[in-house]
Amino acid sequence: MRASALWALVVLASAAGGARAQEPRAVVIAVGDAPAEELLRGARDAGGARWVGRALEATRPPVVAPPAAALRALEEAYFERGELQSCLARAQAPELQVDRLLIRGDRETAARALALGATCAFQANDAAIARALFDRAATAELDLSEPLTRAPPDVQSLYAEARRAVAGRPRRAVEIVTDPPGATLRVDGEEETCAEAPCRLQLRDGPHVLVAEHLGYRARVLELEVSGDEAREVALDRAPSALARSQLGHALHGGVTPDDLRLLRAAADAYSSAVVVVGWREGEAVRAALFDRSRDERGVLARASAPAREGERAVAEVVALWRGLEPTPPLESPWLWLGAALLAGAAVAATVLAIELQPDPQFSFVVP
């Protein structure tokens, strides 16, 4: 009987554990100097999920220094020593490749490298290469006027001719659709060509470099050779957790607010959580916002604020609002399954108990 009762208790404990396991994984993110422990306590007191706490700081994206040494060596080869062959060789250094510079957004260095490379090529009697470099600059709408101030007049005339020729080319409609939608597009090193894809770009015929960026995803680079209207679909790969979290910090540094839907979606992926609560200080208050990935179409589900010393109250409020949004479908409710499991366990225990308490049969033997 003792073993049977123990088995029944195991059944009941397993049922309770199963209901707990059905609660979603959720994260409370304390942004900046928000009180992390208080925010997490507010969420855990409100319940409804397996809450964990994380901290997130606004961080400046790493700044890649321009290739000053390579550019200086190129200038010295032409202006100080007049070594045209050395100049041409240095113009082809990997650090000065135009596409690489444009991908990084360094249009100024790209313009200087193209101007010096074209000047060296022209002076070395290779006008075709010089013209091709000037065409590339004009197609990317790089202004070489300042870098060419020390170039011979015939080089400046060739540049002006290339600009006129490129300006006469038609602009083509290039439709860019990204998966997922909403990526930011940069073309030819511009800071932001399109804030949110899908976008219809107007690009002149010729080569272009496009960078698609989206919170929570790896950046994707496309080299386009435009010659007519076209449509492109750009699929982005999810970023590893560490990269995604650094992107969140960079986004906050760039002015994205903690309750921005794009940031909350990326945080859900970065922290592998179904539900995300962010808390942050704003003046004399602590604010909180909640996002539920299973209800993505509804956006940010709840917002609340509380005095600075009562941050847990703001979090508890958004969690309570989330839990009371709409009833869970009966068959998806963990409490239904818990109740069913408890009833089943009780029934099993009662059956076992009844069997155990049943009197032992008595046998009588009659000897004739």
Image: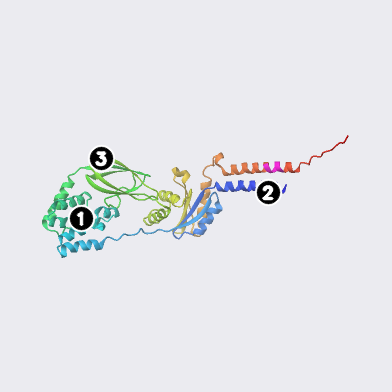
Give how far apart the Cα atoms at labels 2 and 3 are. Answer: 75 Å
Highlighted range, magenta: 348-352
Q: Is residue 351 magenta?
A: yes
- The residue carrying mark 1 is 114
Left or right? Give the position of 13 relative to 154: right
Q: Nearer the viewer, residue 260 or 331?
A: 331
Q: Amino acid at mark 2?
A: Leu
> At label 1, which amino acid type do we have?
Leu
Q: Quadrant of the C terminus?
A: top right
Instruction: Give above or below for 251 relative to 229.
Output: below
Q: Does label 1 or label 3 sit earlier along the sequence?
A: 1
Is any part of residue 246 visible from this angle? Answer: yes
Tag 1 or tag 2, which sits nearer the N-term? Answer: 2
Distance between the alpha carbons at the discs numbered 2 and 1: 82 Å
Tell me which residue sits at (23%, 56%) in the image: 110
- Residue shown at 51% from the left, 59% from the top: 37
Label 3: state its secondary structure. Answer: loop
- Measured as percent of width and height from the top left, residue 131 is found at 16, 51
Q: Provide the residue designation for mark 3.
A: 229
- Compared across the picture, whether 88 is left or right of 37 comes to left
Answer with left or right where residue 76 lies relative to residue 364: left
- Furthest-front residue in view? 368
Callout in the foreground (2, 1): 2
Residue pointed to by mark 2: 6
Q: Amino acid at mark 3?
A: Asp
Q: Is residue 25 above or below residue 74?
A: above
